[in-house]
Amino acid sequence: MQIFSPNMLKTFDECQKKYELRYIQKLNVPQPANVFEKGKKIHALAHYYLRGDNIEKFLPTLTEEENNIWQKLLNNEYFQKQYVNSEYNLTARISDFWIGGRLDAFMKSGSNYYILDYKTGAVPKSPEEDYQTMIYLTCADEILSKGWGTNFKLEFIYIDLKNNLNHIIKYDETKKQTYSEKITQTCSKITTAKTFEKNLNCCKFCEYNKLCF
Ligand code: SF4
């Protein structure tokens, strides 16, 4: 069963050829490890902390910069809400397609639910229209609706750890409709594509530029 992730849909919109190389030909170009190192450490630490592990032994391994980031996350009001789950895989069916992804954390306060996404780098330029926002909210809404009907509120919070800011996206019926249409449209384009067009405007920093013929 094909599950479309936010990155798959983003990649297809950015360059269809890149989508073909990465997700159909399954060519993975190694990235420099240090690009993701800081983010990975903070995400792992947050997951251990939230699920109740003793994290004392990990703290001395943090650099000063990482420790500052960690303190910002610990003090974030949404990170202090009631824990539901973390590193949590969600899927949902939209029209003929399965979509899914892994949330950093899922928190609650009464009947208000919060999807948290910690960013040690940049927050998406248009957070409301980002596929990550659309897919995670759609999946979480489907799960919550099964248990609570319409008796809950749902928000997506990008926690910008660089600038110590929260970007909040409230989910409602209008967004539900818009997101469903957009996701379905892109999944349909992918599954019916006969050829995958190159987007030559994106080649300069593309990791596939030596493999793309
Ligand atoms: S090199 Fe250019 S055309 Fe090829 S996959 Fe990358 S962005 Fe697309």
Image (spheres, grey):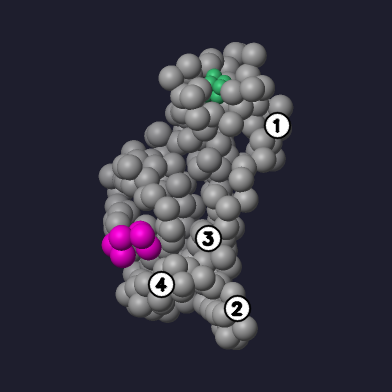
SS state under label 1: loop
- Which badge, 3 or 4, comes first in the chain's sequence? 3
Label 4: which residue? 68
Q: Is mark 3 within 8 Å of ligand 1?
A: no
Residue 70 makes an appearance in the image: no
Asked whether the viewer can see residue 10, the reply is yes
Q: Amino acid at mark 4?
A: Asn
Q: CA distance from mark 1 to mark 4?
A: 36 Å
Q: CA distance from mark 2 to mark 4?
A: 14 Å
**Would you place residue 209 above or below residue 106 in this image?**
above
Quadrant observed for ligand 1 in the rendered image: top right
Residue 161 lies in the magenta-colored region: yes
Identify residue for label 1.
27
Q: Secondary structure at mark 3?
A: helix
Q: List x then y, in percent, for residue 212.
A: 63, 19
Query: Which residue occupies the foreground of this view, 89 or 201?
Result: 201
Displayed quadrant of residue 207: top right
Query: Residue 20, how many percent across, how many down?
Result: 63, 25
Residue at (46% x, 72% y) in the render: 64
> Where is residue 44 drawn, in percent x and y?
58, 68
Work out whether mark 2 precedes mark 4 in sequence or the reverse, and give the earlier one.
2
Q: Mark on residue 53?
A: none
Question: 190 and 148: which one is in front?
Answer: 190
The quadrant the N terminus occupies is top right
Q: Which residue is mark 3?
A: 38
Check disc 3 and give the amino acid type: Lys
Provide the residue span drawn in magenta: 160-166
Q: Closer to us: mark 3 or mark 1?
A: 3
**Gap between marks 3 and 2 measured at Cα:** 14 Å
Circle 2 residue: 58
Q: Is residue 20 left or right of residue 108?
A: right
Q: Relative to 30, is 19 above or below?
A: above
